[in-house]
Amino acid sequence: MAGLIFVLIGVGVIIGALTLRVGSATEPQPGFFPFVGGVLLLILSSILFVQGLRGRSLGTKAFGELRRPAILIVAMVVYVVILDGVGYVIATIMLSAIVLRILETKSWWVIVVASLVLSVGSYILFDRLLGVTLPNGILAKLL
């Protein structure tokens, strides 16, 4: 059932992306990335749907552990709420650390270094190199 629902969502995303200008891979327009995402969702959910029809699912449990996904959802909601106030770099460091902890990364040094590299690296890539405006927040005077 989930495969069928995501197939329909994928088709909806593709249709929505086609109402925008899609462009090409070398000159993407606003609908390009939603279109690619919709196609990927359609392909993967079709595989899930076919596996469900054949009775070849990977798990038999109705629900797995709910604590970690719930923490991730709350963390993403908090990320969206604090993004403008504290800025992209600090909010992304915090979210990355939480995600790495949820993924059971044992070493705190790995969590700190990976979060810093991901946050600062993606800021430099998008804000400085690609010209995408990201919220500076409390670091506005430094950046």
Image: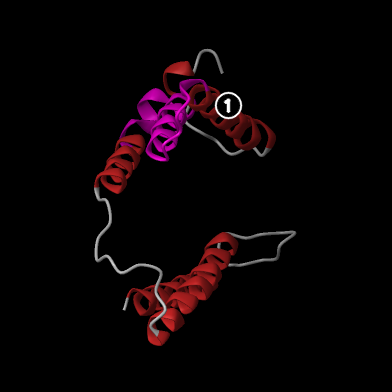
Position of residue 41 relative to residue 56, above or below, is above
Please, what is the three-letter code of the amino acid marked with disc 1?
Answer: Val
Measured as percent of width and height from the top left, residue 3 is found at: 39, 76
Is residue 117 found left or right of 75 in the rendered image? right
What residue is pinned by disc 1?
Answer: 120
**Is 16 one of the magenta-colored residues?**
no
* Left or right for 58, reference 65: right
- Which residue shows up at 51% across the image and 20% down it? 109
Rendered location of residue 85, percent (x, y) = 36, 26
Asked if residue 59 is positioned above or below residue 1 in the image, the reply reads above
Q: Secondary structure at mark 1?
A: helix
> Percent from the top left, x then y, of residue 121?
62, 30
* Magenta stretch, overall SS: helix
Residue depicted at 25% across the width and 50% down the height: 66
**Residue at 49%, 77% in the rendered image:** 47
Quadrant location of the C terminus in the rendered image: top right
Magenta stretch bounds = 81-109
Q: Residues within 10 Å of mark 1 (few under 14, many from 20)?
A: some
Figure check: 135 above or below 32 = above
Q: Where the N terminus falls, by quadrant?
A: bottom left
Residue 57 in view here: yes
Quarter of the figure with residue 33: bottom right
Q: Is residue 62 above or below residue 113?
A: below
* Residue 62, position as x, y percentages in the image: 24, 66
The residue positioned 25% from the left and 44% from the top of the image is 67
